[in-house]
Amino acid sequence: MIDLRSDTVTQPTPEMRTLMAGAIVGDDVYREDPTVTELESVSARLVGKDAALFITSGTMGNLLGMLVSAGPGREAIVDSESHIFMYEVGGASALAQVQLRPVVTERGILSGRDVFDSMRPDDVDEPRTCLVALENTHNRHGGVVWPVASIEEVADAAHSNGLRVHMDGARIFNAVIATGAATAEIAHHADTVTFCLSKGLACPMGSLFCGSYEDVDRARRWRKMLGGGWRQAGVVAAAGIWALEHMVERLAEDHGNARTLAEGLAELPGVDIDLSRVETNIVIFYLRSKSSSDFLRLCREREVLGGGYVSGRVRFVTHYGITAEDVQKALDACTRALAG
């Protein structure tokens, strides 16, 4: 089965499994797991922040961003198609008690003007705007990458008005490969950043929350309150250290496979796709004459899995384990599914 549903379905490499089996561990709640400590130190240096905290998921990382930088009765500005707004079960409002103000954008990239226009006035009847959250790369907009200049523009608009900036960098390393910019350059203008190990880097689980010493100390307390305190987490942290050293450059292969897949889909009758949005490893396209559910059912019968949305929208994601040969097989399956 060629599984293009998400880059979360990746399997650990043999090297990761070996390192996990032999990892030196301790109780991380007591700050005694040396492998976790090493992962956090490596991660903080990589994104150019003071400190990092090993956590279970990107969703937890984004929630920690809300808890650390916002608070009850406050408001955060987000893109209307952002993961925080669409796919985190309302955690910002339910747990952080933060109201989200969604802004419609063309490609998932906010502007400084969007920040200014979305800020609340200093009015006793309205919540106080306290945070801007951006997603890089942007999932629902097809893996689109934020230009570094756009990040700086939004951060300047936010900071000049006393707002903080959180970056949902679940796929920040895809942005690194696509732009050629250093991770620290991309993360520089955000106060807090979270990134995932469990997507393109192929680790079995885990994310990192990064920021100042104060922000990470506060996040550590919130993590414990949320039930996210690790014990011998070095078993999985070992995979993360190896991934950061060996799996980032490999993402270029995923990007190449996604481009081949997208260009092949663009040639098929009944498919609409904006190739300008295929910048990384996500391919989103639209079907003119079939529902996404029917199309994906027919693909599954031909041993290809994908993800569907409403109104004929389909998502394929390339990742570790998907080869150039798999892409050609997937295109063949799509051709037959469209004809079926």
Image (spheres, rainbow, N blue to C red):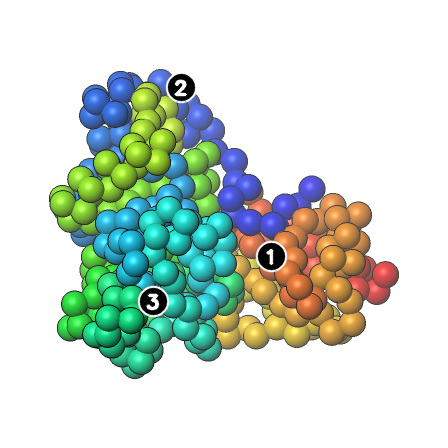
Query: Which residue position holds label 3?
Result: 77
Q: Residue at x 52, y 48 (%)?
A: 7
Q: Amino acid at mark 1?
A: Phe
Density class for disc 1 (Cα within 10 Å; few <14, some 14-19, many ≥20) is many
Viewer-side label of 1, 3: 3
Image spot of residue 278 (x, y percent): 51, 67
For the residue pair 313 and 277, the one nearer the viewer reads as 313
Tell whether label 3 touches label 2 (CB within 8 Å): no
Does dot 2 land on a helix, a strand or a loop?
Answer: helix
Mark closer to the chain start, 1 or 2: 2
Q: Amino acid at mark 2?
A: Ala
Image spot of residue 92 (x, y percent): 38, 53
Q: Residue at x 33, y 49 (%)?
A: 96
Q: Amino acid at mark 3?
A: Ile
Query: Which residue position holds label 2?
Result: 21
Does dot 3 land on a helix, a strand or a loop?
Answer: strand
Count every numbered label the image shows and give the total. Answer: 3
For the residue pair 131 and 291, the one nearer the viewer reads as 131
Residue 100 visible in the current orientation: yes
Density class for disc 2 (Cα within 10 Å; few <14, some 14-19, many ≥20) is few
Mark closer to the chain start, 2 or 3: 2
In this rendering, the answer to whether 32 lies above or below 255 is above
Q: Quadrant of the N terminus?
A: top right
Query: Which residue position holds label 1?
Result: 316
Q: Residue at x 84, y 65 (%)?
A: 339
Outermost residue on the front side: it is: 125
In this rendering, the answer to whether 209 lies above or below 273 is above
Mark closer to the chain start, 1 or 3: 3
In this rendering, the answer to whether 314 lies above or below 4 is below
Image spot of residue 168 (x, y percent): 35, 55
- Quote the CA–CA distance across marks 1 and 3: 28 Å
